[in-house]
Image (spheres, helix red, strand yellow):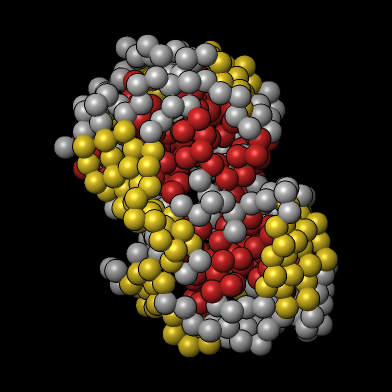
Amino acid sequence: MSNIFSINKAIKPFNKTLQIEGDKSLSIRWALLASQATGKSSAINILKSDDVLSTLRCLRKLGVKIKLSKNRCTIIGMGINGYRYKNEIILDAGNSGTLGRLIIGLLIHSKGKIKIIGDKSLSKRDFSRITKPLKKFGAKIFSKNGKLPVLIEGTNKTRPISYIENRGSAQCKSAIMLAALNTNGTTLIKAKKSRNHTELLFRYLKIPITVIQKKNHDIIKIKGIKKISSLDYKIPSDISSSAFFIVLTALSKKSKLTIKNVNINPSRIGIIKILKMMGVKITFKKINIYKGEKIADLIVESAKNLKAINCPKKFNSSAIDEFLVIFLIAAKAKGVSYFKGLSELNKKESPRLKWGSKILKLIGVKTITTHDSIKIFGDPNLKINKNIIIKNFLKDHRVFMTSVIAALSFGGNWAIHDKDSIKSSFPSFLKTINSVKK
């Protein structure tokens, strides 16, 4: 069966309502915390992507009992530091940076040696941002050049730490927070603004946490504990997955889309703020708070006059996973859009800033790209009438999905390789695309 997805014409006008799969960040965090809880935790709408399935496989190797059915996942928690496993086990994080980094935080008190490995793409990514602070807790952590594999040997004498997280990495911050659970005392983190899903889950679970919000950073204090309560959770739809359909609708003529029950956590909606600045009409309805997270139905309509922007850097962290598809809006905006401070994009599954520029050039849009910025010279009349091949992108799911949205929005004959890449984050992406096309 071919692993190439072909598209040969732009999408027709549509008016649809969608229910997108569960939030990946919340699915992984729920599973990790449920494994440390006391008693049975249950989740509905957990994302069944490769990244989440890798999380469940790793937890099973650590002795956790898990039942996964069509609509529900149940985890029998083993308590703080309750994992039971053979010495020198190997945990395969697959393609998941969230899993690979966060689970190390739960293992600083591990008994025996544990090796963390990942796929080719994950093995190229920086893990020193995690290993350096986690060593301060007292664990022995070894890696070559700050990359996977990582070997961890826990300590019985974990100690709280103080740490400055200045990258705006929610994964780094969360790994430290999870490690802090296993200490006697209070861990202090001064963290650059980033996603706050872990903080919200801690608050809901009544884990002792204090967050003092400053203009550009947060001061986070966490006290070590002996017990976490179980957590039943209905996981909301993923804004990062929804982003592809938001952009598709904005770029399509006479179209409208409603996406139900989307997580609109303020630390995740940079894409909404950016697109509104560019002239995309997006509204929220049925807004409510669910276990700390802000949830709403999202409604987007075709955009008639897209405007170029000088994108404020303050949105970078809250839109870091969506910039590739945001660039497509800039491609059809009037004027030159400028996005800066994006070096973190090249540290994802693929060098995404480079791939964003490459896709735009393939469709005939001029760009000027540096190591951390891109200028996009928009063309409001952009249409494609040529053959385009997308391949050799390290099977980065977001490169694949962005290419599909570009093809459906602008036309042309596209052959996009490695369609299986979507399994890591959004396995029903193509099925959802087909439902919109009908």
Point out residue 59 in the picture as x, y percentages from the top left corner.
Answer: 52, 74
The answer to whether residue 386 is left or right of residue 92 is left
Q: Is residue 208 above or below residue 201?
A: below
Residue lying furthest left in this view?
Answer: 438
Point out residue 425 in the picture as x, y percentages from the top left corner.
Answer: 43, 51
Identify the residue at image location x=65%, y=47%. 125
Q: Is residue 10 above or below residue 242?
A: above
* The C terminus: image quadrant: top left
Identify the residue at image location x=65%, y=39%. 314
* The N terminus: image quadrant: top left
Viewer-proximal residue among 91 and 272: 272
Residue 113 visible in the displayed image:
no
Residue 307 visible in the displayed image:
yes
Identify the residue at image location x=21%, y=28%. 13
Identify the residue at image location x=44%, y=85%. 40
Numbered-mark total: 0
Residue 211, by quadrant, is bottom right
The answer to whether residue 5 is left or right of residue 292 is left
Q: Is residue 368 above or below residue 62?
A: above
Point out residue 159 in the picture as x, y percentages from the top left corner.
Answer: 82, 77
Point out residue 208 in the picture as x, y percentages from the top left corner.
Answer: 67, 78
The answer to whether residue 327 is left or right of residue 416 is right
